[in-house]
Image (cartoon, helix red, strand yellow):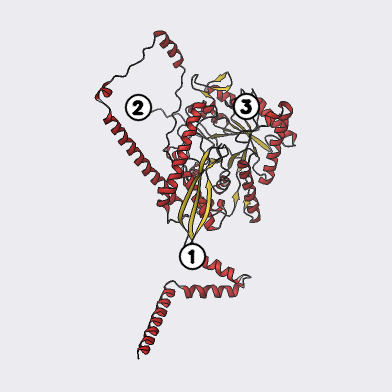
Amino acid sequence: MAASRSSERNAREIYEMKQRAVKFYRENQVPEKIEDILNAMFHENPDDIYGRLSEYFESLAKPGTISKLVSRLVLDSKGQPTVQCEVHCIVKGVERHLSTSSVASHNTLAESAPIERKEADDLERLQFVEAAIEYINGPLCEKIKGLDPTNQKEIDSLICETLEQLKAEHEERERKLKEEQAEEETPQQQKEPVKEEKSSPKAKKKGSAKSAAVVAEEPKEQFFVGCNSICALSQSVLQTAATLKKVQLFEYVASLRYNEAPDKYRLPLPMASILNFGKAAACKLNLFKEVMIMPKPDKPLSEAIKQISDIYNQVGKTLFTKYGVAVKNVNDLGCFIPAYDKPEQALDVLQESITQLGFTPGEDFHIVLNCAAHEMFDMDKGKYEMVTGVFKGPDDMVEVYNDLVTRYPAIIAIIDPLKRQDSEPWLKLCEKLSEKCYIIGGHVYPRTERFLQEGFGDVKSSAVVLKQQQMTSVSDTIDAVKFLEGEGLDSVISCVQGESGDSSIADLAVGMGSKFIQIGAPCRGERVCNYNRLLQIESWLKDKDALSYYESHEFPNILPPPPPEEPVDEVDN
């Protein structure tokens, strides 16, 4: 009798379990889904039945979510500390490591800065890197844990909001600390007057003569310690999302940029650095920081990069013949640094090398000048030191550039020819040259996220240089490219000096539809990896029949604003 009751109970439990199972599978539509794929496969007749089943059920799985962030200190190409970030996700119930991204180390000083300032900058960089690592592994991980990495804009906003909160908390702690220190001071210390040093009339007179020519140096922007975590984490999330979507990184960037991936892509024109000068170089020439070459628009990239490499090596051979083996040493950008004293020397050796290889300067290849005017500006004299000991005012510099472009028509672009404060001469230069030469702004504009808020100011350009560094998120760069497109202008996706070997900048430029990319010379591993990535992308697009080319250059004609209309006096009838 007892055995019978036990048997009935077991049968009832099995029946109830079956009913729960039926309910569970029906609520999740399992029978319908299985029926759909079985019917579809019967007609598809796939070679790999279980592979097709795996693919189908994977498409029905929950989206991956961020489970863990791992950040650490690594070295960039200059041996400086920088941030590396890993993103781990829960995918189909299993935690997986999906991406590792390293951002470029940010250098805030010119190469010619005094050694003591460079040492202070090195210490500051280390503090920023250590703080960024702490934030990514701690509060930022807690904030974005459980989120879908394909929600790029949402995550970028959350990262920035979290950093703002951390900044506010840090400032509050600093304020309280100062108040406590002030309370601990004795009344005598608080009342003790500060002794002012008396200067002789003679010394004052000497100082006043100099101060008449002094131009105030631009104040260094104060970043919040650890803010570089924004760029590092945003870039890592981007790569993670592309991995989850099982698409090329540039395809995923394009889907964010255009809301859906386009049918055709145009590859950016590379501005390849060849020669480097400036106040830190062993030469007198300051007018150009970089001299670059750029292929004509309709040239296949595989052909163009091969020819760029040939020209680069030809310049190296020419310099070796004239100056010996030492001149073939290259800097962080992979550029040669010959000891030239005149602008013409740099332009001539480049044009000669192009011609010697059977190409025509101004047709097959053009010249791009990165002037970095803020670095050649002498604060004491209030003028530009274009060559050591030769100073020119802003209006004089306009004539210098106009003369160079007239004598060297192969020059097709000039980056940062003047400082942002010289807005009137800048517009004069644009009026003279913008119909035949790109006038590009880099340092004249604030970092990308501030540029979106402040705009061009008084300085208008043919294109704007955009860099992934510090507080710049991927969403900021996408918004900046869209803004420039709305203004009818181009964008230049650019590397920085302390690159990390991460080739994602190439994917960013392709996916965002930027017309130009600036990644240094075809030399040094961290530079070459970006050129090689562009070659991979071109090959992939060719196979997909998704590649198109720019047909020609289009120069936005930048004119000064019209004078304000004079008020018309009303005439009494």
User: Which residue is pictured at 62% across the width and 73% down the height?
Assistant: 45
Provide residue 127's location: percent of width, then percent of height. 45, 37
Q: Is residue 474 at all visible to an observer of this figure?
A: no
Callout in the foreground (2, 1): 1
Task: Name the spot of residue 480 as percent of width and height, x first.
Answer: 48, 43
Instruction: Name the residue: 54% across, 27% down.
Output: 112
Placement of 241 over or under 47, stated as above or below: above
Q: Amino acid at mark 2?
A: Val
Could you give the CA–CA distance between mark 2 and mark 3, rounded to whole angstroms? 52 Å
Q: Position of residue 274 (x, y in %)?
A: 65, 34
Q: Name the residue furthest top.
A: 202
Quadrant, the C terminus? top left
Q: Which mark is residue 61?
A: 1
**CB of mark 2 within 8 Å of CB of mark 3?**
no
In the rendered view, tell whether residue 263 sits above or below residue 163: below
- To which residue does mark 3 refer? 404
Residue at 58% across, 41% down? 516
Q: Nearer the viewer, residue 87 or 1?
A: 1
Q: Could you say which is closer to the camera, residue 468 or residue 485?
A: 468
Q: Which residue is mark 2?
A: 571
Q: Determine the secondary structure under disc 1.
A: loop
Q: Nearer the viewer, residue 400 or 91?
A: 91
Sequence-first tag of 2 and 3: 3
